[in-house]
Amino acid sequence: MGKMLAERGDFLEAESLLEPLANDYLEDKNYQQFIEVESVLLRIYGELERFDKINAAKERLQDLVIRSEFQLNSRMYYVLGVCAALKEQTDVAHEYFQQALKLGLDTNIKKDICHAIYGMAWVYRMREQYDNALKEIYNLQVFFELIDIPDLKVSSLILNGNILRSMGKYDQALDVYWQAYDLVKESKHLYMYIRLLFSMGYTYLLQGETSMGKVYLNLAKRSIDPKNNIFMGNAIDRVMDKYADISESEFDLVLDEEAHQLLEKKKGKVDFKSQFILLDLLKLFMSQPGQVFSKEALVEKVWKQEYDPRVHDNKVYVTIKRLRKLIEPDYDRPKYIFRSKQGYYLNKSAKVMVHH
């Protein structure tokens, strides 16, 4: 019942039910059930920002270990890792999750292995070691082919999306969030739904799609109970406050997809009507500023053709040149479209916004 309340976002009521239950399990020395309940309570404490209770939980777990009343297993190390991660002690958390993974592999308990891998990915993201985080997510996906853990699968997809968002890969992040959304629809897990709304809204804002981002964030805001969802409520407020006063004048490039028009800070309006290839090329660049697109990738994504250097090399060169002439305030000194050895890209520092 307590876990169901937590899934629904009723953290205060869940806390009141689960804390006595955890104490009962501890008194009865039913340590396995105690750890399962404690794991749920830690998520609740994190959402309610009860850092004193997170500390108390960690001390209680460590006391169990010191008194040797409980044989250390993968699940225990995972819960200790969660305690450390919630306190942003990433080095300590990493050690605990590594130990959890080792014991999980030794005992071949796939559920424990999956939780440990998730913990590793979580810590790597906190450390901004995104490539390592994605490797752990991939490992987790392999295990999900062998075992079904619905809540962890959704959480891992949200984490995957968050990692991609941190890497500036907004389109990929949104694709992953939509995968998570399909699973949440089946599970009817309200809190996961709110997490998704927030993650998607934040990603749209970072992508420059301010209107869309605010829609999702407002939906997330309306879906929460401020008393029950303190952490998420604060996160939403911080993002909404940061982007509350954003106006188009703050952006270098503002694209109106429906009107086929671009607003460049110095040049003003640039019309892309009947110039569909140029528009698609610009949309691609604006979707991921700083992302280098090879000629092969451009041909595949913009022209929807298989790359042939005899056909496409000059076509790409000429099209890039035309795009520069349209959007660059000074064609001889480009500030937006650049070329590298690997391909072409939009200046990462360019502030862009896209209206769908």
Image (cartoon, grey):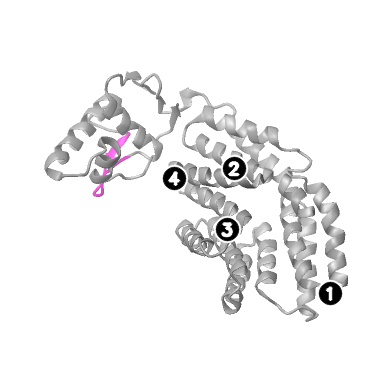
| Amino acid type of the residue tagged 1 in the rendering | Lys
Residue 225 versus residue 155 in the image, above or below: above
| Amino acid type of the residue tagged 3 in the rendering | Trp
Q: Give the spatial CA distance, label 1 vs label 4.
A: 46 Å
**Tag 4 or tag 1, which sits nearer the N-term?**
1
Mark 2, residue position: 196
Secondary structure of the residue carrying numbered label 2: helix
Say if residue 49 shows up in the picture.
no
Q: Residue furthest left?
A: 310
- Specify whether residue 344 is painted magenta: yes
Please give the label number shown on residue 131: none
Rendered residue at 63%/42% (across/down): 193
**Tag 3 or tag 4, which sits nearer the N-term?**
3
Q: Which residues are magenta?
A: 335-345
**Tag 2 or tag 3, which sits nearer the N-term?**
3
- Residue nearest the observer in this picture, 15 or 230: 15
Mark 1, residue position: 29
Mark 3, residue position: 122
Q: Give the spatial CA distance, label 4 vs label 2.
A: 15 Å
In percent of width and height, residue 187 lies at 64, 47
Looking at the image, residue 48 sits to the left or right of residue 176; the answer is right
| Amino acid type of the residue tagged 4 in the rendering | Gln
Rendered residue at 53%/27% (across/down): 211
Residue count near mark 2 (Cα–Cα under 10 Å), binned few <14, some 14–19, many ≥20: many
Badge 4 vs badge 3, beta-carbon distance below 8 Å: no
Q: Quadrant of the C terminus?
A: top left
Say if residue 118 shows up in the picture.
yes
Looking at the image, residue 202 sits to the left or right of residue 169; the answer is right
Secondary structure of the residue carrying numbered label 4: helix
Rendered residue at 21%/32% (across/down): 319
